[in-house]
Structures are given as C-alpha cells and as structure tokens.
Image: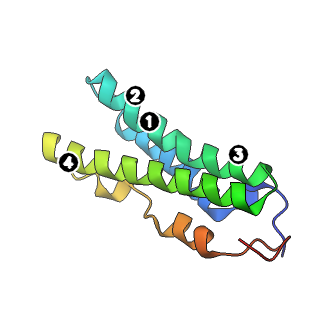
Amino acid sequence: MKIQKFEEIIAWQKAQELAVRIYRKFSELEDKTFKSQICRAAISISNNIAEGFDRKSDKEFSYFLYIGLGSNSEVKSMVYLANKLVARNLSNVVVSGGYLASWLGAKRENSGTM
C-alpha cells in the first residue's frame, strides 16, 4: 500500500508519542534550559519526517529522515544524562532509533528508490 500522507508513517506516529511522553516526563523540571532542549529535540523528530515526506523527492526525504534520526539520538542522550543527574529511570521514554532506521532503509513505493 502506498503511503499518501505523512500521518500514515509509523515512525511519525511513534515520534509524536515520544514528544508527548517527553513533555509529560519533564513538565515539572526546574532546569528550563534542559527541559526546552529535550522538548525541542523530541518535536523535531516528527517534524522532520513530515517535512521530508512532503518534499516529494526521495533524496530530500532521506535527508530529513537522517535529521530526525539525529534528533532522536539527541533525545536519547539527554535521557541518559537526566538518569545520571536525577537517578530516575527514564529509559522507557525513548523510542529506539529502529523506527527511523527502518524507514531509512526502506524504499518509497511511489518511486521505488531511496
């Protein structure tokens, strides 16, 4: 089945869930700089998937997926740091890079290339 809109992409859906979970987990954080950075990085994941998909070229889509993957790694790194700083287990918050990685290796059905 050909994906018609970015909302159908599982990685985008998971990234949206991640952003909501990040916002909820860090809503009470007193360090506003840390909170802002992790929230912006979390939002960036789904935004880059959406923007890349709507560019309509496989090359640009791939580029934006890599940007999203980088943002996912940034969130993951910040969760590790938060765990060390506050000794809370937040590891269940992060979506593994596997969701984006699967899209990076996949071919878009509308063109057959990536």
Is mark 3 in CB contact (under 8 Å) with mark 2?
no
* x then y, percent, for residue 7: 73, 54
Quarter that holds the C terminus: bottom right
Is mark 1 in CB contact (under 8 Å) with mark 4?
no
User: Between marks 4 and 3, how big is the CA–CA gap?
Assistant: 31 Å
43 relative position to 75: left or right: right
Q: Amino acid at mark 3?
A: Glu
Residue 49 visible within the image: yes
Residue 36 disc label: 2
Residue at the disc numbered 3: 51
Q: Amino acid at mark 2?
A: Ser
Which residue sits at x=74%, y=54%? 53
User: Between marks 4 and 2, how big is the CA–CA gap?
Assistant: 17 Å
Comparing labels 3 and 2, the label whose residue is closer to the camera: 3
First-in-chain label (4 vs 3): 3
Is mark 2 in CB contact (under 8 Å) with mark 1?
yes
Residue 20 visible within the image: no
Which residue sits at x=32%, y=22%? 32
Q: Amino acid at mark 4?
A: Asn
- The image's colour scheme reads rainbow
Residue 90 disc label: none
**Could you say whether the residue bearing mark 1 is in a helix, strand or loop?**
helix
First-in-chain label (3 vs 1): 1
User: Between marks 2 and 1, how big is the CA–CA gap?
Assistant: 5 Å
First-in-chain label (4 vs 2): 2
Using a 10 Å C-alpha cutoff, classify the residue at mark 4 as few (fewer than 14 neighbours), some (14 to 19) or many (20 or more). some
* x then y, percent, for residue 105: 60, 75
User: Between marks 3 and 2, how big is the CA–CA gap?
Assistant: 22 Å
Using a 10 Å C-alpha cutoff, classify the residue at mark 2 as few (fewer than 14 neighbours), some (14 to 19) or many (20 or more). some
Q: Is residue 71 above or below residue 59?
A: above
Residue 39 disc label: 1
Residue 83 disc label: 4
